[in-house]
Amino acid sequence: MDWMPIPTAAEDEAELRLTGDFDLYHAPLFSAFVMGKIETGWKTLLLDLSGVGYLDSTGVGSIIRIAQALRKKGSKLRIRGLSGSPRRVLEMSNILPLVEETH
Amino acid sequence: MKSLIIRKLIVDERNELFDAQGMKSVEFPSDFRRVREYAAQVLKDCPDDFREGNLLEQQLSEIIKNGIKHGNHCDVSKTLRVWYDLRKRARFIVEDEGKGFTELDAWNEFYRKRQTALFQEDFDSFLALASYRGPQSDDTDGGNSLVAALEYWNGGMIYNQVKNKVGVVRWFSGGSDIAKHS
């Protein structure tokens, strides 16, 4: 899985576009990257998942950790472009109430 | 009206889900890097209707990962055995050589609290409880695979007494579609 920053209006408002498999082999590295950024400045984050075709429980765990870290900064993780089996996995894990979906 | 649904992981040594008669089986060394490859291999002749995109592969991968990682501790000299039957429904038995899922009762209690917080719309508590963290959890453990599994395996998810073997079934809707695979 790759992730690409999308330019935003403010430095502490981040947006990332993810492509590939958000799975047990890629999610830990992604988590570490984002958690580091939240610790050092990011206050909001929008994840564009339209390029993610596979999401597993490690990926869901990564989303939960990010949502928890952002909650401490007073914001809710935003997600865009969720469809197919990744949406089903988040639904079955009951995680959708923890994030804000945008279009 | 929404309802509070609390499922449970169940131990039942004699459950019919452990009857492997007529099932095919395959054995894998416990190589963590190959978890998804193993799932794909088991499903290579799976009917497309059962795949639901990559959902079946993903859910089978989770069970294989649990056996390889938590059961066999990624020791490649240890074997993971998978029985499978893809006629009419997707049915699997996965057995590792480990000491079993000793945290099963603790997980059930975690799940009860998690679902209750969600039902009460107590999102701060729910967020704190979203992932199960056991003594052996690390960064590759999402801590939520069993939550989705209990919903996905709609025909049952049962552990044996030692808890190193799990039997699962998923039935699919659309009876006439399923009949052509029988």
Image (spheres, rainbow, N blue to C red):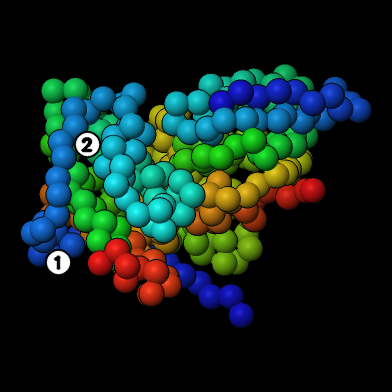
Q: Is residue A4 left or right of residue B113?
A: right
Question: Which residue is nearer to you in this view: B135 or B49?
Answer: B49
Question: Which residue is nearer to you in this view: B99 or B48?
Answer: B48
Q: Label 1: how many residues lie within 10 Å, few (<14), some (14-19) or many (20+)?
A: few
Tell me the residue at 57%/61% (across/down). Answer: B118
Relative height, residue A62 to residue B13 (above, below): above
Judging by the rendered image, the residue that carries numbered circle 1 is: B16
Relative height, residue A61 to residue B24 (above, below): above
Element on which disc 2 rests = helix
Q: Is residue B124 left or right of residue A24?
A: right
Element on which disc 1 rests = helix
Q: Most extreme residue toward the front, as rendered?
A: B180
Relative height, residue A44 to residue B32 (above, below): below
* Image location (x, y in percent) of residue B50: 39, 57
The N terminus of chain A: image quadrant: top right
Judging by the rendered image, the residue that carries numbered circle 2 is: B71
Q: In the rendered structure, which amino acid carries the disc numbered 1?
A: Glu
Tell me the residue at 38%/74% (across/down). Answer: B176
- Earlier in the chain: of badge 1 and badge 2, it is 1
